[in-house]
Image: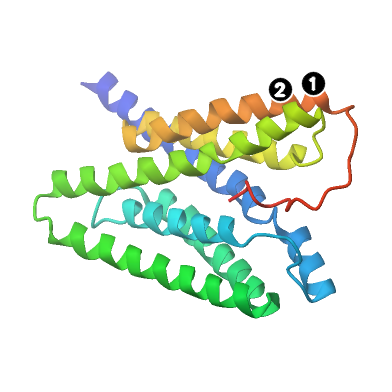
Amino acid sequence: MISFVLLASTSTICKDYAGVAGNIFAFGLFVSPVPTFRRIIRNHSTEHFSGLPYVYALLNCLICLWYGLPFITTDNILVTTVNSVGAVFQLIYITLFIAYAEKPKKLKMLGLLLAVFGLFAIIVVVSLSINEQAMRHIFVGSLTIASLISMFASPLFIINLVIRTKSVEFMPFYLSLSTFLMSASFFAYGLFSDDLFIYIPNGMGTLLGIVQLVLYFYYKGGPIEDSLEPLVVSYA
């Protein structure tokens, strides 16, 4: 009995440490678009940059934030905190993008932003209408997996670009490292909490992070080409 209690206590401690580490490493991802927005503010134009990654990232953060709340799961406060911070960052980026975008882009981004809030409201209402806690957990958890996998799959475009151009110009090292460390941390967090809705997508994110790091070191001496492709398209 004592050994079981000690094992449970150790598992909880490891889970908390992994969650805190994930929150810290996620900050590296959240601030990665800062250089892009410095350029946008300096030039008073969004140029050829895309605002879609920030819209997708906002929706992802809102869904995961909702999953971590007591309405859906218990003892997942670290999931809520990281996604709350992420949602704030994405809202700031979207606001800046709208402020400096041309009118057609402004209208498109505003429409997408309203669509995100509308979809999230529907998810909240539907999930709260499910009386059975287990079914509510499965419903929101399934959406969380789908959302996270779609976000982690987005670097596949960049991986293809790196292989095709033999250049890591569009795959910054620290961004790839932050992706790997954050994914690995929440993969461990999910394992320690025995939550497949967390460890499955973050396990995939960890593997993709490893692939990015391997490619970075393989191609880091490659050519740097001038390009108008937006640096932020595949990073959300």
Q: Position of residue 138 (x, y in %)?
A: 22, 42
Give the camera-side residue of 58 and 4. Answer: 58
Q: Position of residue 236 (x, y in %)?
A: 58, 51
- Specify few, some or many for label 1: CA neighbours under 10 Å numbering under 14, 14-19, or 20 or more: some
Give the camera-side residue of 8 and 164. Answer: 164
Q: Return the residue found at the far left.
A: 131
| Left or right placement of residue 220 versus residue 95 in this view | right
As drawn, the label of residue 145 is: none
* Residue 122 sits above or below residue 32 on the image: below
- Specify few, some or many for label 2: CA neighbours under 10 Å numbering under 14, 14-19, or 20 or more: few
Q: Identify the image quadrant of residue 15.
A: top left
Q: Secondary structure at mark 2?
A: helix
Q: Identify the image quadrant of residue 80.
A: bottom left
Visual colour scheme: rainbow
Tell how many labels: 2
Point 70% across, 27% down: residue: 213
Cα distance, mark 2 to mark 1? 6 Å
Q: Is residue 195 visible?
A: no
> Residue beneath label 1, please?
218
Point 32% across, 51% down: residue: 67
> Residue beneath label 2, please?
214
Quadrant including the N terminus: top left
Amino acid at pointer 2: Val
* Residue 220 sits above or below residue 31 on the image: above
Q: Position of residue 113 (x, y in %)?
A: 47, 70
Disc 2 and disc 1 in contact, CB within 8 angstroms: yes
| Left or right placement of residue 69 versus residue 56 in this view | left
| Left or right placement of residue 66 versus residue 102 in this view | left
Q: Secondary structure at mark 1?
A: helix
Amino acid at pointer 1: Tyr
| Left or right placement of residue 14 versus residue 212 in this view | left
Q: Is residue 129 visible?
A: yes
